[in-house]
Image (cartoon, grey):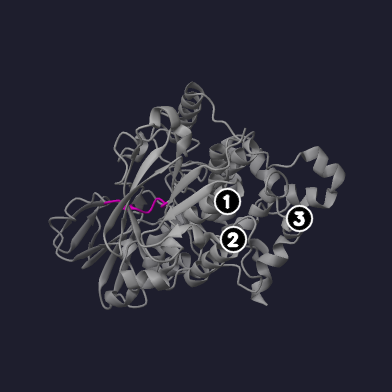
Amino acid sequence: MVDKSKKVCVIGAGISGLAAIKACLEEGLIPTCYEKLDFVGGLWNDHNKEKHDTSPTTYASLVTNISRVNLGFSDFSAPKGWPPYLNRYQVGEYLDMYADHFGLKECIRFKTEIVSVTPAKSYSKTGSWLVKVKDLNNDEISVREFDGVIVACGQYNKKIKSFVPGLDKDFAGNVFHGGDYRGPEKFKDKSVLVVGAGYTGSDIACESTRTAKNVFLCARNGTWIVPRVSVMGTPFDLIFNRLGLLKERWLPSWWSNKNVENLVGSRVDHEACGIKSKYPYMNMLRCITISDELPLKIYSGQVKIRPEIKEIRGNTVTYVDGREDFVNTVVVATGYTPYYPFLSEEIFPSELGEARLYKWIFPFKLQHPSTLSFVGIQANAFGGVIPVSEMQARYVARVLSGKKELPSKEEMQKTWTETREELLQSTGGKYVFRANLFHYQEDLAQDLGLVPSFLKLLLTDPRLAYMYYLGPVVPYHYRLVGDHSWDKARERSLNIMDEALSGMR
């Protein structure tokens, strides 16, 4: 018998938290969400976040790397008149609209900080947890017991330090993390070195050219520069179809690499730019930079690409190839790692590589792995953040409701080991927390019965079958069949390109 009265604690009201609240409500659970700030949206709600001077935040000029169709939730579309790529204010507004539409704010206790999450006295029998919270309005501490806890406060919690020799002790200029970047004004007439050529580092380097005297971008391992706008004016993330992505699993990796690298290389000569990746596009060690501006900045000499740094002394940066640059500002754009101080080291280790998570969600070493889960710790690779977090949330809610059972600990351990070994083989022995997000999301959906039968779809709705397999892969596909399907999913799936480009007219 399915227990529909379970009380679930959701930590965080950003993208992952909102998805978790919604999924719990769909499955008849009773969610209570605790949010440290006084608004929803987390990282993206920066018109509010700047008032709190919190980090990380997004900068005023930021534009999403994924088109709005693939950025959004599977059953709630952004307004059709909005452009294909959203700015940070629109994303924050979209998340606020989503929370209002589904009545999610009623489940949220704002300005409440999580102090600790520990096993309850009855944990060995029930798997329940004690959640200690602090009301930031009056500093009052309270404790409540929950049947399940969903840690959904994201992965942008702890800044990753850049181990550049001399940066901490011998550098004579200013250093700050990319998550603290607001705009290029402070770079006026400066010589700026940006360490890290990922999404944020590339954006900062490009924008810095508006005010800085010199801008250098350190791409230690190189990167693949992917344009937002691809062939025939199509958003890059909408040129891939399900059939092609499924074939990746069966075709040799060199074939997939060749096709994608030829496509990406048709727009940018990575070798001439000095930014060619040391790793193939399909290798999980590679870096991807989504930018239409960076190639022009490199071609025009406004951004100068540099290799790995050997050392920094005073204001002089020496690279491994012997070149030197004078800089007085260094931006460390090396990202973040998940960090949950309210959990013990035994539950979630400080080193992400030591985490033992079944499907990147459930800590299978625990006695009751189903009652504590992580939504939003995504294998960092190219793809939409919202749809993957939403799929994780739907999976967790189904497990907590009792409609879906996790395998035995031995089976979960076996799956985790196989996934890790496969990853290590593909990277030459180096472990990174990454995966192909399409295949990952598809596997979760298959487990939940959200993937249509090919034969049935072909026989009953050939037009939809064509768009499903040969058209763009979009979140609406996961609301066509199964529990909590959406009556507008078919229409949306059939008219993807019209919807994606409608905001330009």
Q: Secondary structure at mark 2?
A: loop
Q: Label 3 near label 2: C-beta < 8 Å?
A: no
Q: Which dot marks residue 125?
A: none
Q: Label 1 near label 2: C-beta < 8 Å?
A: yes
Does residue 382 appear in the picture of this structure?
A: no
Earlier-in-chain disc, 2 versus 1: 1
Q: Where's residue 171, x and y in %?
A: 16, 60
Q: Secondary structure at mark 3?
A: helix
Q: Where's residue 175, x and y in %?
A: 22, 63
Side of 314 where 22 appears, left or right:
right
Query: How far is disc 2 from disc 3 in space, using C-alphas?
Result: 21 Å
108 relative to 428, above or below:
below
Amino acid type of the residue tagged 3 in the rendering? Arg
Looking at the rendering, the stretch of residues picked out in magenta corresponds to 153-161
Q: Which residue is mark 1?
A: 25
Query: How far is disc 2 from disc 1 in space, using C-alphas?
Result: 9 Å
Asked whether 157 falls inside the magenta stretch, the response is yes
Label 2 neighbourhood size at 10 Å, few (<14), some (14-19), many (20+)? some
**Of circles 2 and 3, which is in front?**
2
Q: Which residue is mark 2?
A: 102
